[in-house]
Image (cartoon, grey):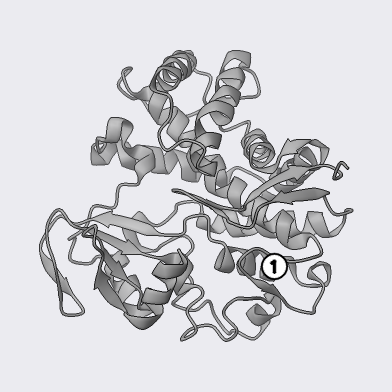
Amino acid sequence: MRKLHERCVRTPVFRTLAGSVVVCDAEAARRVLADTGRRLDHVPAFWRPGNVRLPPPECVALNRWVHTCLADEDPGRAAADAVETVAAARGDLHRACLHAVAGAHRRPLGLENHSDLRATVGEFLDHVFHDIMTGARRFPDLDTFQRLTARAGRAVADGAVPGFPELDPAIRGEVYLRAVTAFAGASAAALAWLICAQRPGDLVAATRSKEPVRDLPPEHVALETLRLWPPAWQHRRPVRHDHRIGGLAVLSGDEIVVPAYALQRHPRYWPDADLFDPGRWARIPRRPEAFLPFATGPGACVGARFEVRWLAAAAAHLAERPPIPLARHGEIPCVTAVFSPPRHTIGPRTP
């Protein structure tokens, strides 16, 4: 990521050796993601069971379901539940945050009253998504994944998940588990980064301002956490029609990459770009064009507004309680489809 960031600072639009077209100019990135010419495919990976794009009506129904679920959620309650669950946990921070966030969304995910679905989701988070999130595995164990999708599909068919769209029985279990990652994946990574930032001491891939985090507005802490450590560290879009970006030919079959991590640390847009300074948000009249943790346009995260409110509520809750004890193992963040902290263990450091 460091080499990508350095190249982004030097060159606003370029093609990688792998063939992707990287757009590191804020104005151009927003124009690309808005895609008024309909040149790109904006269906997220969540809604691609078996790597096959779901038909637009089904994608719309799933996005509507997510939006409706989040509209009915109380971000303050969800944040308090998640923070206290992590604080009571021991062991791996990533795993604790995944379970805490999924548990905080237990009602829309159907986990309150269906024990088998709750066990299925727990096993999925432990043995599939956690390994992918931390880089322990590049691909899930196919037998385990298929077994869990079959179990999830049966539970969904039993009506365990309120309002879940009608889908082909062959894919509904996989789509549901992908929905679990939509609810829990990025939010768990953001919560983990926030917990690390609340701790005294050195930060990962950032320096700390002199202002105590606990004395700052929670929304500013949330925004600065998302700026420096965006869980969705890049936004990828397959190209459907040939066109040009900044003089560079982009062809059907290429992939556009908007690197949110690099844009949100670009010295052209951010003074002291690597400084964790929540106070900067009090000095900014509106969110800058280079702030793209949720993308924008037709493929933007449907839960963006809820995510900021939820993360701000988590920052407020963390500020009111003793710091969660953590022991860090290594300095390198986990960079997969999700950008998350290095491995941490919750609990007092043992001799």
Amino acid type indicated by mark 1:
Val
In screen coordinates, is 98 left or right of 180? right
The picture places residue 69, in percent across and down from the top left corner, at: 54, 40
Residue 157 or 9: which is nearer the viewer? Answer: 9
* Residue at horizontal 49 percent and vertical 72 percent from the top: 291
Which corner quadrant holds the C terminus?
A: top right
| Image vertical order of residue 40 relative to residue 202, above or below | above
* Residue at horizontal 68 percent and vertical 71 percent from the top: 220
Local crowd size for mark 1, using a 10 Å CA cut-off: few (<14), some (14–19), many (≥20): many
In screen coordinates, is 110 left or right of 80? left
Q: Toward which corner of the image does residue 20 lie, by quadrant?
A: bottom left
Residue 76 or 83: which is nearer the viewer? Answer: 83
Q: Is residue 160 visible?
A: yes
| Image vertical order of residue 57 relative to residue 123, above or below | below
Q: Looking at the image, which residue sits at the far front?
A: 351
* Residue at horizontal 29 percent and vertical 73 percent from the top: 31
Q: Is residue 110 visible?
A: no
Disc 1 on helix, strand or loop?
Answer: helix
| Image vertical order of residue 32 relative to residue 351, above or below | below
Q: How many numbered discs?
A: 1
The picture places residue 145, in percent across and down from the top left corner, at: 43, 22
In screen coordinates, is 102 left or right of 174? right
The picture places residue 29, in percent across and down from the top left corner, at: 33, 72
Which corner quadrant holds the N terminus?
A: bottom left
The picture places residue 34, in percent across and down from the top left corner, at: 30, 66
Residue 242 or 266: which is nearer the viewer? Answer: 266
The residue pinned by badge 1 equals 221
* Residue at horizontal 70 percent and vertical 65 percent from the top: 203
